[in-house]
Amino acid sequence: MSRYHDYLRWLYKGGRPNRLARLQNSASAAVFARGVLPRRAASLEVRGRKSGRTVSLPVVIADLAGERYLVSMLGEGANWVQHVRADHGQAILRHGRCESVTLEEVPVEDRPAILRRYLDVAPGARPHIPVERSAPIADFERIAPSFPVFRIVATGGRKDPSIR
């Protein structure tokens, strides 16, 4: 494993972002929201399940067979996953424009090909998902229950994130 992969794993030791990772995530979310960097990168805005405040985080969008998906590289324990589930999938994606979306959880049996595609387009996620991107699909089937995947469904144009 490379030092860079070790560094990325350290940022999320214990499945949660450390202080530096939170700082980097805030900066990345702000840049991605403006549409400055890669087309696949965006800022996801979800309502906090306890606080009700808007939480923004950087995400990489995986595309497969004409659909768009978000994957939790940290698995079931990621806060954003719990926020999305608590708010019935309602979220905002920003990448130069604001898109109101519903995130629909993908059944476990449909996740393996999406997880493989995600590892192709999200190099920063590779140290967190215990399968090589070139591994047989059976390896992805084995880990699929541990990594939530959400289909992005546009719900109609632009929306002010402060209005829910």
Image (cartoon, rainbow, N blue to C red):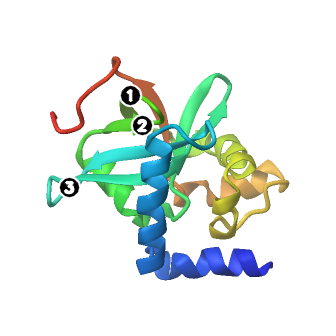
- State the image quarter where residue 16 is shown: bottom left
Quick check: 8 above or below 94?
below
Upstream in the sequence, badge 3 or badge 2? 3
The structure residue drawn at horizontal position 59% and vertical position 26%, both measured from the top left corner, is: 67
Residue 74 location (% of width, % of height): 51, 65
- Front residue of 30/61: it is 30
Alpha-carbon span between mark 3 and mark 1: 21 Å
Does residue 126 appear left or right of residue 25 in this picture? right
- Front residue of 110/148: it is 148
Q: Are marks 1 and 2 in contact (CB under 8 Å)?
A: yes
Residue 135 location (% of width, % of height): 83, 56
Upstream in the sequence, badge 3 or badge 1? 3
Does residue 132 appear left or right of residue 15 in this picture? right
Alpha-carbon span between mark 3 and mark 2: 20 Å
Image label count: 3
- Residue 125 visible in the current orientation: yes
Residue annotated with mark 1:
99
Upstream in the sequence, badge 1 or badge 2? 2
Picture quarter with the C terminus: top left
Q: Nearer the viewer, mark 3 or mark 1?
A: 1
- Label 1 element class: strand
- Front residue of 44/74: it is 44
The structure residue drawn at horizontal position 80% and vertical position 78%, both measured from the top left corner, is: 2
Q: Amino acid at mark 1?
A: Glu
The structure residue drawn at horizontal position 48% and vertical position 67%, both measured from the top left corner, is: 24
Q: Nearer the viewer, mark 3 or mark 2?
A: 2
- State the image quarter where residue 1 is shown: bottom right
Residue 114 location (% of width, % of height): 65, 41
- Label 2 element class: strand
